[in-house]
Amino acid sequence: MTTRTRKPRVLTLKDAFETEFARREMERRAREEAERRQQEADLEGAQALHAAVTADGDFLAGRNLSADVRRYTVSVDHANYRIAAYFEGGKASVTLSDKRGGAPGSGTPRKQETVESVEDALKVMAQFLADEAR
């Protein structure tokens, strides 16, 4: 009985390069896909928050407020202040800015809080609005 022994294949620089290149390409694609999914989730969060903020147009109009959404940012504007929520990385950064005494269109940040959900962002925006309403 004869047994054939296979000689192990000798790894060449080309083989090692192609293996490493393919590994890096797979990692890059996985990172890009994860980033794309996160951006979609952030965009969905901003759209959901905007829908909640604008659900009662009479409330906004009665307080001289306007709401806007731009990609990942939802803002509620008044002549004297702006409340904005920016979604990134699965979290929202909610900021209250004072428009009085600053350059037109900009505001001086006064309060900032980072939250984990659309519901929490809405709650913090309501708190900031209540602070300004008094």
Image (spheres, helix red, strand yellow):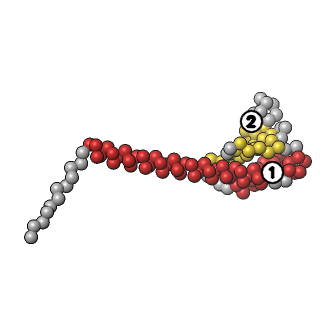
Q: Position of residue 93 (x, y in %)?
A: 67, 47
Rendered residue at 83%/41% (across/down) = 78
Q: Which residue has dot 1 on it?
A: 54
Q: What type is the residue that disc 2 sits on?
A: Thr
Q: Residues within 10 Å of mark 1 (few under 14, many from 20)?
A: some
Element carrying mark 1: loop
Rendered residue at 82%/34% (across/down) = 100
Q: What type is the residue that disc 1 sits on?
A: Thr
Residue 108 at least partly seen: yes
Q: Position of residue 50 (x, y in %)?
A: 75, 50
Front residue of this view, candidates 122 and 98 = 122
Report the disc number at residue 108: 2
Snapshot quadrant of residue 6: bottom left
Q: How many angstroms separate mark 2 from mark 1 (CA)?
A: 24 Å
Element carrying mark 2: strand
Residue 113 at least partly seen: no
